[in-house]
């Protein structure tokens, strides 16, 4: 068993077999798609840690294969690795909100994203772009990946807009849950957003399904845990 395969199986056990059935179900096919993506994308060796690692990518691909979304949305372009994975796994109508001001990285990201399709690229602050998508009243997505700003407030705002753009029954993936800011966001979701049900949870990525119907009272509030220190292990 390869190191990555071993890590993936360990994370499946940590997460609980019932939660991760869909990822385990598609493990072989996910690996095939991932190998294909890796053979075509171009990411500088020194910056590979910035892109989704193989465990993250496997879960993302498995979610695509399991839920078969028609329209997908991604907050954060980076090097385009996740965009390539989404499209290689069947995503044919993909929208990317690019918040990256690093033109060199963005050029890599655009090339990699275009290896497996012709995604729509929207440039600008995610709060502005996502709000405009909502205002158009024509946008709805079956899968949304949140991997933009990683401060609590940035990720919170991305989530606030993303759940309005995610169709009922659709999937929201939140990356980098090893970070205290993102752990805190997920804790708030679990305590306060009953319409979002967590269907998978790994060390570094959480998957929610939108059940719709916000029935909270106007003054709803539930306490939630706040992460206060960075965990000893990171996504690698």
Image (tube, rainbow, N blue to C red):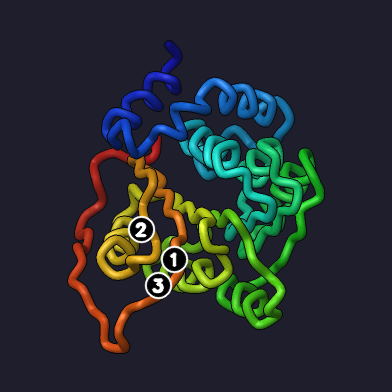
Which is more N-terminal, label 2 or label 3?
Answer: 3
Q: CA distance from mark 2 to mark 1?
A: 7 Å
Dot 2 falls on a residue whose secondary structure is helix
Q: Which residue is mark 1?
A: 155
Question: Disc 2, disc 1: CB below 8 Å?
Answer: yes
Is residue 48 among the parts visible in the rendering?
no
> As rendered, which of 88 and 170 lies closer to the eye?
170
- Image check: 185 left or right of 26? left
Callout 1 crowding tier (Cα within 10 Å): few <14, some 14–19, many ≥20:
many
> As rendered, which of 156 and 18 lies closer to the eye?
18
Q: Which residue is mark 2?
A: 182
Say which residue appears at 43% left-offset and 72% top-offset: 213
Callout 2 crowding tier (Cα within 10 Å): few <14, some 14–19, many ≥20:
many
Q: CA distance from mark 3 to mark 2?
A: 10 Å
> As rendered, which of 91 and 36 lies closer to the eye?
91
- Image check: 27 left or right of 123? left
Dot 3 falls on a residue whose secondary structure is helix
Question: Disc 3, disc 1: CB below 8 Å?
Answer: yes
Residue 102, image x and y in percent?
Answer: 65, 58
- In the rendered view, tell whether residue 224 sits above or below residue 218: above
Picture quadrant of residue 120: bottom right
Say which residue appears at 45% left-offset and 50% top-offset: 175
- Image check: 79 left or right of 188? right
- In the rendered view, tell whether residue 69 sits above or below residue 202: below
Say which residue appears at 34% left-offset and 30% top-offset: 12
Instruction: Report the disc number at residue 116.
Output: none
- In the rendered view, tell whether residue 204 sits above or below residue 192: above
- Image check: 58 left or right of 223? right
Q: Which residue is mark 3?
A: 153
Which is more N-terminal, label 1 or label 2?
Answer: 1
Say which residue appears at 64% left-offset and 28% top-offset: 33
């Amino acid at each position: 068993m390869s190191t990555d395969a071993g890590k993936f199986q360990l994370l499946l056990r940590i997460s609980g077999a019932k939660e991760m059935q869909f990822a385990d179900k598609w493990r072989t096919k996910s690996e095939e798609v991932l190998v294909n993506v890796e053979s075509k994308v171009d990411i500088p060796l020194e910056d590979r840690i910035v892109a989704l690692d193989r465990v993250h990518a496997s879960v993302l691909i498995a979610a695509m294969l399991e839920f078969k979304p028609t329209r997908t949305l991604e907050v954060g372009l980076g090097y385009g690795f996740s965009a390539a994975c989404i499209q290689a796994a069947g995503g044919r109508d993909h929208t990317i909100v690019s918040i990256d001001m690093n033109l060199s990285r963005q050029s890599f990201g655009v090339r990699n994203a275009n290896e497996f399709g012709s995604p729509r690229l929207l440039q600008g602050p995610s709060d502005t772009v996502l709000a405009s998508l909502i205002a158009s009243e024509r946008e709805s997505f079956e899968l949304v990946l949140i991997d933009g700003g990683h401060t609590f407030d940035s990720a919170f705002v991305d989530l606030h807009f993303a759940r309005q753009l995610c169709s009922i029954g659709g999937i929201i993936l939140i990356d980098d849950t090893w970070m205290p800011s993102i752990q805190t966001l997920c804790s708030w979701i679990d305590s306060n957003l009953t319409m979002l049900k967590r269907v998978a949870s790994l060390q570094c990525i959480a998957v929610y399904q939108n059940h719709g119907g916000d029935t909270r009272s106007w003054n709803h509030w539930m306490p939630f845990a706040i992460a206060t220190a960075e965990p000893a292990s990171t996504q690698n």
